[in-house]
Image (cartoon, rainbow, N blue to C red):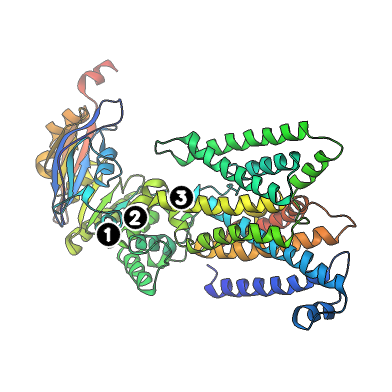
Amino acid sequence: MRSPRFYRLCMITAVIVTAVFAVAALCMGRYTIPLSEVMEELFGGGSDMANVHTVLFQIRIPRILLSVLAGAGLAAAGCAFQSLFGNPLATPDTLGIANGASFGAALGILLGFQAVGVQTSALIAGILAVVLVFAVTGGRRSSMIMIILAGMVISSLFSALVSLVKFVADPQDVLPVITFWLMGSLSSVTVKSLLYGAPFILCGIVILYLLRYRLNVLSLPEDEARALGVDLKLLRTLVIAASTAITASVVALCGVIGWVGLLVPHIARMLFGNSNHRILPASLVFGGLFLLLVDTAARCIAASEIPVSILTAVIGAPVFILLLRKTGGIRT
Amino acid sequence: MKLSAEHLCFSFEHEETVLNDISFTAEEGKITAILGPNGAGKTTLLRCMLGFLRPQSGTVRIGDKALEEITGKQLRRMSAYVPQAKNSAFAYTVEETVLLGRNPYLSLFAGPSKEDVRIAEEAMKDCGVYDLKDKRTDAISGGELQLVLIARALCQQPRILILDEPETGLDFRNQLLVLELLESLSRNKGLTIVFNTHYPDHALRIADTVILLKEDGTCLYGKSSDILKEEILQDVFDVNIHTITETIHGKTYSAMIPVPKEEETDDA
């Protein structure tokens, strides 16, 4: 087993790298701002150039904050769901939250809502998807496998509804907006939308973080968990509520971002073993760093923005395979 | 602390009776074995004792209290459950697994304290798995895993230990290890132990009392030497049984050998 020292060292390093990179990301972009200007703006009396102020405070800072928050949230939600379902393949979308929220957003765009309206309808539809999953599995005490199956059904139902919205959308102007939005992008974030969405993500993160010691018990077979004195109903409700708040808000703010929820917890497991009291905090830190890197790449690599989901897969898959080969998937 | 049942009846929804008027008392510091053919309801009875299933009538009592009167965490500090050795989706280290036994003592958001770690270490030592503490549970043998799960249950500091076929699927040496561990836990620590088993020999070896479940849901209950007799087992398991008794190094061992019934042998 790798020692607690190795874990602490990795975590501290990751936090420092995230901070350094966040500052670097403030300078980078189509409009490059020298570090001295950034520092002047942040800690000095402000620079004389008005557009530097606008770019920093209206665009880059909200966006960097969102990327760290969304990455951390998605990774933590993925980690929690993998424990909840006792299944390493579970992702934050397993219960259909992402497809539900996508439908809400697509519908909002189709109906010509403003940004906050789209965000709200995405949030509501994402929560609705989870509520539907539990309505389908019904009043009886239902097994986890039933819930997963219901999640898959509801998820594909909403996925079909998204297609329906795209089908009826005007291919000239509305359809491209929906399509691009669904591919995931942090470009549309504003101070206002961040202030509206971030509290949900933060609440979810705090709840999952506090529950990190309980997640190991949660991953055991039901009888064993109950025999260990866990209030399964309460614990499952808390985990699902927190993960739903995170996932629905992230989709509402920046569309569907795949891979983070699956990839990051597994990277953490390869490094630190399976115990969630380490994997959950590690997922938070690595998830934030990962999405910060990916999003910065998304807006800096090419003249026009690359959708984040494409990059998470293109960067994520090889990194994952590399780690898998190097560690054999098991920490020894 | 004793574990008892009075006139316990249980059936699953719309199905025939599994348990019919079961009464027994597992005394403090004694070992009780549950035997019976496949499908006679051994696991169901265990699940009733653990409070996972609610009997249609009758009561399970822990000490003098009815099971329903004891709240969740309180109950799990009195009685602990050892499942059959099986790895779950995520393999934790032995120490992390044993520490899960501290769960009934921790509040929703709390992590284990130094004291909890110390208790876990003691439980691992009692079960002889302390040397494995940093190994993952999917990297140890089935026998070792069973001992780890017993250590996890001990970590709950219970007075009653309920085990589901603890020696099934283990090799000779590990079977002995588990049986000896159970014996020493009851004799030295005064734990009340109830376990399911398929082996009358094992029950004869360590159990003080036996609950023999029959196909019709009723049971025979009594001292193991009174229940585990050839004529009784022949009837319940529907086979002929021969008992062989040997004295080795001054200790008497009994083995029961199942033999097909004569008319079946004639057919063949």
Number of the label disc, if any, that sits on residue B234: none
Secondary structure of residue under mark 1: helix
Residue B158: percent from the left, percent from the top? 25, 59
Number of the label disc, if any, that sits on residue B77: 1
Q: Amino acid at mark 1?
A: Arg
| Viewer-nearest residue: B4 or A113 | A113
The answer to whether residue B140 is seen in the rendering is no
Report which residue position mark 2 lands on: A229
Secondary structure of residue under mark 3: helix
Chain letter of disc 2 in the image: A
Whether pointer 3 and pointer 1 mark residues with C-beta atoms closer than 8 Å, the reply is no
Q: Amino acid at mark 2?
A: Gly
Left or right placement of residue B48 versus residue A222 in this view: left
First along the sequence among labels 2 and 3: 2
The answer to whether residue B264 is seen in the rendering is yes
Chain letter of disc 1 in the image: B
Report which residue position mark 3 lands on: A236
Estimate how packed mark 3 is, as few (under 14), some (14 to 19) or many (20 or more) residues with alpha carbons within 10 Å: some
Q: Is residue A288 above or below residue B216?
A: below
| Pointers 2 and 3 within a single chain | yes
Q: What is the quadrant of residue B151 in the picture?
A: bottom left
Q: Residue at x 72, y 31 (%)?
A: A164
